[in-house]
Amino acid sequence: MTKKQPNYVAIVDDHLLFAGSLEKLIETFNGFDVLYHAKNGADLQQKIKENAQLPDIILLDINMPVMDGFETVKWLTENHPSIKVLALSMEDDETVILRMLRSGAKGYLLKDIHPDKLEEALNEVMEKGYYHSEKVAETLLHSLRPDDSSVDLVLKENEITFMQLACSEMTYKEIAAVMNLSPKTIDGYRQELFNKLHIKNRVGLVIYGLKNEIISL
């Protein structure tokens, strides 16, 4: 029987003692191997260039010298969108959490997380594409308040077109025909928007479109 390939994790944190302890912990989780640590985003860029194997998940600190977590997650989203980023920080601030999620992070964990919860988060982000802790879910709910207009997420033109069509009664197959794209590409747009906007279905897409005046009734 062929041995199943593990899920590869990279740790980006300038506190080497913490990163080393975290590596030892993750190595005890079934199905996960740590590829390497990086001390900041610039160091991570170099390690990605030097290693043929890309990590499946990156555990990313926020406050780091040279290139911090915000810059790093944006670079990863633009250059390696297949890598799932989980922020792992001491920062327990709603503004910071939202900024990281809107920049492309698939989840946000506090460094005092229980080891069982960390293992759960790693498994869930591999299975579902994201992990929302109770803290993150609460923060996202607060971000939907009517008086919150701080939307800094940038959508591509095709994503906006897809969202507008998806908010109609058209099927995804019909949307593909209208946009002159393959159904597979449309499925990709849909999943990317679901991940980017932290929503789970078409109803969430409509709510987001209405709230941000992308569509109107």
Image (cartoon, rainbow, N blue to C red):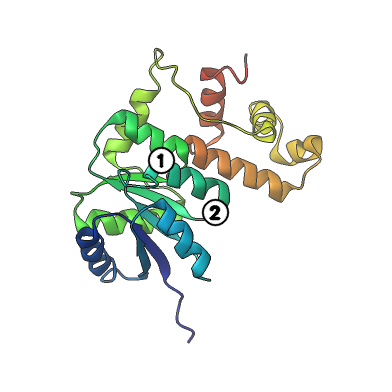
Q: Residue at x 48, y 87 (%)?
A: 1
**Residue 22: % across, % down:** 24, 62
* Dot 2 or dot 1, earlier in sequence: 1
Question: Do we see residue 198 in this rendering?
Answer: no
Question: Cα distance, mark 2 to mark 1?
Answer: 15 Å
**Residue 160: % across, % down:** 65, 29
In what quadrant of the picture does the C terminus appear? top right
Residue with the mark numbered 2: 80
Tally of numbered tags: 2
Q: Residue at x 24, y 65 (%)?
A: 20
Looking at the rendered structure, the secondary structure element under dot 1 is helix
Q: Is residue 19 above or below residue 85?
A: below
Residue with the mark numbered 1: 70
Question: Do we see residue 19 in this rendering?
Answer: yes
Callout 2: 10 Å neighbours few (<14), some, many (20+)? some
Which label is found at residue 40? Answer: none
